[in-house]
Amino acid sequence: MSWKEVAEPVLTRMPVVDRPAGHVPFKRKLAWTAGILIVYFFLTNINPFGLVAGQGTDFFGQFRSVLAGEHGSLLQVGIGPIVTASIVLQLLGGANLLGLDTNDPRDQVLYQGLQKLLVIIVTALTAAPMVFTGEFLPADPAVGEALGIGGFGVELLIFTQVFIGGVLILFMDEIVSKWGVGSGVGLFIIAAVSQQIIGGFFSFSALGTSGFFASWYGIIIGEIALGSPFTAEGLQNLLFDPGNVLALFTTVFIFGIVVYAESVRVEIPLSHARVKGARGRFPVKLIYASVLPMILVRALQANIQFIGQILSSQWAGMPEWLGVYGDQGEPVSGVFYYLNPIQRREEWMWFLGEIPATVEPWMITVRIIIDLTFMVIGGAIFAIFWVETTGMGPEATAKQIQNSGMQIPGFRRNPQVVEKVMERYIPQVTVIGGALVGLLAVMANLLGTIGQVSGTGLLLAVSITYKLYEEIAEEQLMEMHPMMRQMFGNE
């Protein structure tokens, strides 16, 4: 008896959001997307009952722009479990250990059910150490005494709320994917990054406000708080502060380079086999796999650091070579230090005076080299996995072209022939694009961005927004010309 036969009764009964029976009007899709976005912001600003607000270490702090969510809220775990489950399934699928054919409707149901089950398990495994160790989400003893459930009872109550929040974001993602525009994961990343960028300009925390805003003050409001920007000194600080200028430059540069990279492509000419004069082109973009595989790379790094945090807090005799943690909860030496990606320019620029005295220049150099290697090679590897598992590889693409009735002029109308042509471009472009995105992400982290958004987060937000714009334009085109829905199979 195979594992599919054993697990089928469970996987086929997993809760699922039904697909729309027919075409969903564009305005209704926008309404669903906006509604989920409002719910997302609402949940990120609700503290779990029983939590000591404003306390505890935010482990995902440096990865928040990639994993979304908010520390100390119901969405504490963000999209981390969804991404981690995707990594596991991609690795298992890439090694052909699942034995599932995604073209088979029955196996598709099993795959989706397995993904949901894995996300739920990872959500529990992620939330449990955050709550029960007391390091990340400390429970309020006064609540335990008032309710008569003790400290463990309060921790269990907080865990339940965070777990429910993690499951909610899973189904919010599914609602957007089936009833809205784009994907929920992409929407939440855009929301998290946009909030940080806006906060980088207009945060009021320098004036004593805390909570919703970041712990640093924004460029514009910060200058108003420290001195009027309309004076000569204030204007000079606003425009010519090295940190501000570098962050502005990096942010604008990443925006520009991603938009440019999205437009760079190799176009393979196509012609219809039966309709004379009907021609088209198959675009192979420079960032063919998109920047979404970067989520998988950063999530893997986040999980490694998560293990380090847990070991440091629970293992009193942890060897120094494995990791030594400072007052801010970040490693300052050892293996976990070198595996920790640099997220801010303050972590490597000595003249800023914020690097611990125990950190030597050679240690920073090794850390940068490891991060760069991890991102470039990891970006290329996960890009290959992404292309193969999402039906974007040469073989799947050749079948799509064949089924559409198109062919490459000058070649026989045969899937194997088309596949050979695609193999000249897709694998090479996939590797180059994945490595390029990894390089850009590291560079953005080293130079810093507005709102201290991570380079990966900014790359993701720009690319996802660009693709969202293309999808909205396509939806509007189909609304204007209903016959096109039949051509794209959306009727």
Image: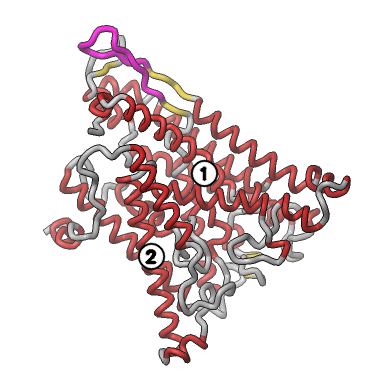
Q: Position of residue 85 (x, y in %)?
A: 36, 56
On screen, residue 7 versus residue 466, left or right, reads left
Give the SS element for disc 2: helix
Q: Position of residue 485 (x, y in %)?
A: 26, 29
Q: Position of residue 420 (x, y in %)?
A: 31, 23
Query: Residue visible at 58% across and 33% down?
Result: 257
Name the one closer to the observer, 168 or 311. Answer: 168
Q: Residues within 10 Å of mark 1 (few under 14, many from 20)?
A: many
**Residue at numbered disc 1:** 461
Nearer the observer: mark 1 or 2; the answer is 1
User: From this viewpoint, is residue 150 visible?
Assistant: yes
User: From this viewpoint, is residue 313 visible?
Assistant: no
Q: Residues within 10 Å of mark 2 (few under 14, many from 20)?
A: many
On screen, residue 275 versus residue 338, left or right, reads left
Query: Residue visible at 57% across and 44% down?
Result: 441
Query: Residue visible at 34% across and 37% down?
Result: 26
Name the one closer to the observer, 11 or 331. Answer: 11
User: Residue 123 has which mark?
Assistant: 2
Quarter of the figure with residue 88: bottom left
- The magenta span reads 269-283
Amino acid marked by disc 1: Ala
